[in-house]
Amino acid sequence: MNSMIDESSSAATLRDNADVAEVLGRTYSAGFITQIEMTGLPPGLDEGTVRAISAIKHEPEWMTEWRLEAYRHWLTMPKPDWAKLKIDPIDYQAISYYAAPKVAPKSLAEVDPALLETYEKLGVPLHERAALAGVAVDAVFDSVSVGTTFRKQLADAGVLFCSMSEAIREYPEIVRKYLGSVVPTGDNFFAALNSAVFSDGSFVFIPKGVRCPMELSTYFRINAQNTGQFERTLIVAEEGAHVSYLEGCTAPKRDENQLHAAVVELVALEKAQIKYSTVQNWYPGDENGVGGIYNFVTKRGDCRGDDAKISWTQVETGSAITWKYPSVVLRGDRSVGEFYSVALTHHYQQADTGTKMIHLGKYTKSKIVSKGISAGRSSNSYRGLVKMEKGAEGARNYTQCDSLLIGKKCGAHTFPYMEVKNPTAIVEHEATTSKISDDQMFYCRARGISEEDAVSMIVDGFCKQVFRELPMEFAVEAKKLLEVSLEGAVG
Amino acid sequence: MSQPASLPLVESLLDAPLPPSGLAWLDVARQENLEAFATSGLPDTRVEAWKYTALRALGQRRFATRDMAAPAVAVDAASLVLPGVDGPRLVFVNGVFRADLSQLGNMPAGLSLQPLSQALAGDAEPLRFSLSRHYREPGDAFARINAARAQDGVVLRVADHAEIGEPVQLVFVAAAAGLDLAWHARNVIELGQGAGLNLVEHHLASGEPTQLATLVSDIELREGARLQYTVLQNASASTHLIRRTALRLQAQAQATLHVLELGGALVRHDLQAELVGDGAQLHTRGVFMPHGRQHIDTQLAIRHQALNTTSESTWRGVANDRARGVFRGAIVVAPGADGSDASLSNKNLLLSPGAEIDTKPELEIYADEVKAAHGATVGQLDERSLFYLRSRGIPLAEARALLTAAFCRAVLADLPNEALRDHLSTLLVNQLPDT
């Protein structure tokens, strides 16, 4: 039986429920890349599924109700079609909404070696490598956190860093206060779906005045076939707190489209700073556009206090379809929002990504730097909104969007929206689209640099402004990722 | 989409039966467009093209479809005259052609200019393509009703290689009619190979009419044709003016547009240009200057479809009081349109706390041998420049007017007709707030 149940006091009640037990006992048999037995719910979604997920996670009554409310709202919502994406219809009943490693480890030592090996391949500094790398990792394998390191050091500093399900059990007041306060359950189609069925994710709470002693990191990993991943991340930085959070994603090769609908909520109170960095390298599908991850993410930060700062940095090279707009609500006076993005698409990948900066407070500032690179037959769009509300006295925005085209069959698009209601606010937007210039190529080639290396160099230079914002180890990884992703793009 | 039948505006526009034109194909096309309008109703703000222009209030209004007095209503002929524009003139009052106000004598060689109502009575076949068009986009409601109801408008042709020296003036007068009126006009304009034309479109009001007016213009430039096109929109403060201008540029054709949007209550201009021939060039410049409670929406869409095409656009917006300025500048470079060079700049000034600017420059690029860039800004007058002027004894109001005029200057700077340019500059300055 599922050990998740064994470890809990309410296991007995659950076991009595034959349906749930049967459902939980179901084992996937085919097509695993990592040979770990899986338990999960069968495909399908109804109120029962939502209740079952909540029950598996031993959630309190209010949480179950919260999920159900989101689910009922989701049923009434139309699928969004405004993005410049071609999406085959998704059968939400064909997806399994919960998967967990069958043996839930009590400590890192009990972590399945096969699993650790996968992390090893991905370069996750878990286990002894964690200490060397100096990174605390809350690694998420499919839906349940399997190991958390550096808990003690963080606990000494007063930082709470754990899985979402743990947080719901152990810190219900904090979770209840902030969960859904930035991205409401009915915010959009995918956020509503996530709210109903989210499986797990990370929870970070930095108390007042604390500077998080290390960079926090989570590696998400999609593994089980047909399992949508519904991550839910909540980061709260109290007055004057600082935190830098790293999120990295990889997924093994898989032929079927997999759905991923994550929600990330950031709350920064007065003078708090949150820096959120992402490297997203999920399976993009093969060169014929078969397979790949559908990535529909709602990420939003709320600068709730004065002088707060939220910064998003992302490097998006993976996924067949990316639909993602990390946003900042600049509520507090003098708060700052930043968005740095590199999005690379190749073959048949489609990306529609960008940001929203909603200026409400006085003298708020935002900066957007977006670099899009399209190759092959891919489509890459920047879509952004800068909104200056009436109260945004003296607010300032600067946006720069550049696109680079590699090849004749790809598309690069820019859709910036600017809405200004305050005459003292200043909004600036600039965008360019071009291909790698022949002059630059000629210069490199004349100096004996191969065509592929030259492209890689030029692309790296094109993205420098964004890479500079990434934590060091991510910057190295990001550069490599671009090189790998662009293989075969030239010639 | 809202329930079309429940909206008074839609009801009133569907009210009268379509008068037969005597041409079977035209009656069919008009009927189909009317039915399409009846089915779709008005677009709401969920339709992307109407995101920033809500038709809720307009939808509650009723407009009469016919003004029996239009052929006779008195209009001050002096108001029609624009400095530097003294060529042939075609005048429409409330959508009805007025021979008495027009100037059609001494037509230059190679120019054919007549009202649509007359053109249809003669050889209507050349108009068939343009007048049988169907509008299929969800935001096309007004093009549909125009296609169904427009009885008059301009048919203008320039023969191959003809160079028309004097500017041709098209005047649309909205005259107070004692009832809230809806009228529709349709222009079909064609420049032959290598032809040159200087065209001025002028919208003005006589009295304070409350109207809904739609104008659809199809403009075709054949190989090597050159068009200089100036639009002065100075409609009355309670006129709802919805225009669509569709330009098609063949190889090596060149079009330069200067657009001044000053008047109107709710003004919408869809300006669509297709560069279908190699080496076609388009320059658009415009200022929209809403004040009071005006709402002026310009939707510019440029499509590069051929090799080595160029487009360059410079637009300025100045919003004052509680007005709202909306701008969309979309550039599409189609697959294979290599060598395209597209640039667009939209700068806006917000002069008052109640005003709003919504701007959306867009790039959609499907070819790689291209240069495409756009820039947009929203801000206010530079404090330092104001201080500089004031420190030299220029009063605040004057300093602001000076700087705002300078801000708009780029738009009119390259208008070759000097007299017209000066006149338009004066109009711009007069529209500036006194504060």
Image (cartoon, coloured by chain):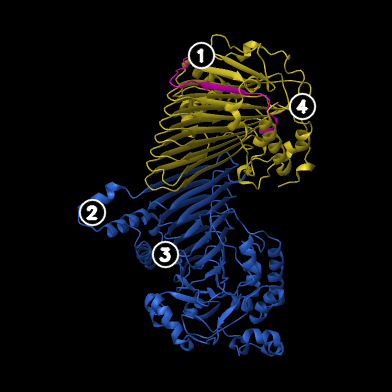
For badge 2, the amino acid type reads: Arg
Horizontal placement of B4 versus A254: left or right?
right
Return the x and y of residue A88 as percentages of the image width and height: 57, 62
Q: Which chain is yellow?
A: B
Reply yes or no: does residue B151 show up in magenta: yes
Identify whether B197 is placed above or below A416: above
Question: x and y percent of residue B247 in the render?
Answer: 52, 32
Q: Which mark is residue B220?
A: none
Q: Nearer the viewer, mark 3 or mark 4?
A: 3
Quadrant into which the N terminus of chain A falls: bottom right
Residue with the mark numbered 4: B180
The CA distance from mark 2 to mark 3 is: 27 Å
SS at badge 4: loop
Q: Earlier in the sequence, mark 2 or mark 3?
A: 3
Calculate the distance from the C-alpha at mark 2 to the C-alpha at mark 4.
70 Å
- Secondary structure at numbered mark 2: helix
What span is colored magenta in the figure?
A: B145-167
**Amino acid type of the residue that numbered disc 1 sits on in the rendered structure:** Gly
In the image, are marks 4 and 1 on the same chain? yes
Counting other residues with Cα less than 10 Å from the Cα at mark 2, is it few (<14), some (14-19), or many (20 or more)?
some
Circle 3 marks a residue in which chain? A
Residue at mark 4: chain: B
Residue beneath label 2, please? A445
Residue B22 spot, x, y in % from top left = 70, 26
Q: Earlier in the sequence, mark 4 or mark 1?
A: 1
Write down the chain letter for disc 1.
B
Give the CA separation, mark 4 to mark 1.
34 Å
Q: Nearer the viewer, mark 2 or mark 3?
A: 3
In-image side of B373 versus B62 (left or right): left
Residue bearing mark 1: B84
Residue sitting at x 44%, y 34%: B312
Residue B128 in percent (x, y) is at: 60, 30
